[in-house]
Amino acid sequence: MSQDIIADTLNEIMNAKRAGKSSIITKKHSKVLIGVMKIAKENNYILDYKIDGTKMEITAGELNECRAIKPRFNVTLGSYDKYMRRFLPARNMGIIIVSTNKGLMTHIEAIEKNLGGALIAYFY
């Protein structure tokens, strides 16, 4: 495992989905990963996540693909369209999670609030 907890967890979710499993248990978590899971749950990409000490159990929902974005590109208000075309399969399909100075949010919320930030992950 690498030192990137978000990338490792999202890869574990995709590997479990390909293997036909609906849930995974990961041994590490962070505040940023919990924020990513909260946004994914709000958008129905994961059904639930539970934290028990240092373990986190995640149940996948209607998910086709989820990946961490490496390197963490900095995005301005005018360049969201470029990254939406790069990471999402179609317009109005999927979300990109952005870390802004107002916290983690989807790219749609960031555009509405006129905020830039760093790209973290995408789900569709």
Image: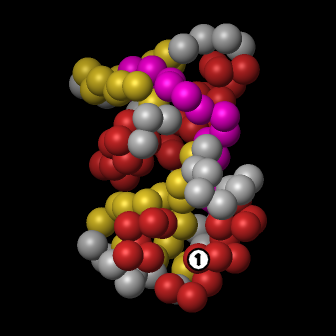
Label 1 Cα crowd, 10 Å radius (few <14 / some 14-19 / many 20+): some
Residue 36 position, x and y percent, is: 41, 48
Residue at which label 1 appears: 80
Q: Measured along the vertical axis of the image, is residue 73 above or below residue 37?
A: below
Relative placement, left or right, of 13 versus 41 is right
Identify the image quadrant of residue 17: top right
Q: Position of residue 55 (x, y in %)?
A: 35, 23
- Name the colouring of the figure: secondary structure
Q: Mark 1 is on which residue type?
A: Tyr
Q: Is residue 117 visible?
A: yes
> Is 103 one of the magenta-colored residues?
no
Q: Could you tell me which quadrant the C terminus lies in?
A: top right
State which region is magenta.
56-70
Residue at the location (38% across, 67% down)?
Answer: 109
Depth check: 39 or 89 in front? 89
Q: Residue at horizontal 50%, vertical 44%?
A: 5
Q: Nearer the viewer, residue 94 or 97?
A: 94
Question: Is residue 28 placed above or below 60 in the rendered structure?
Answer: below
Q: Is residue 31 left or right of residue 44?
A: left
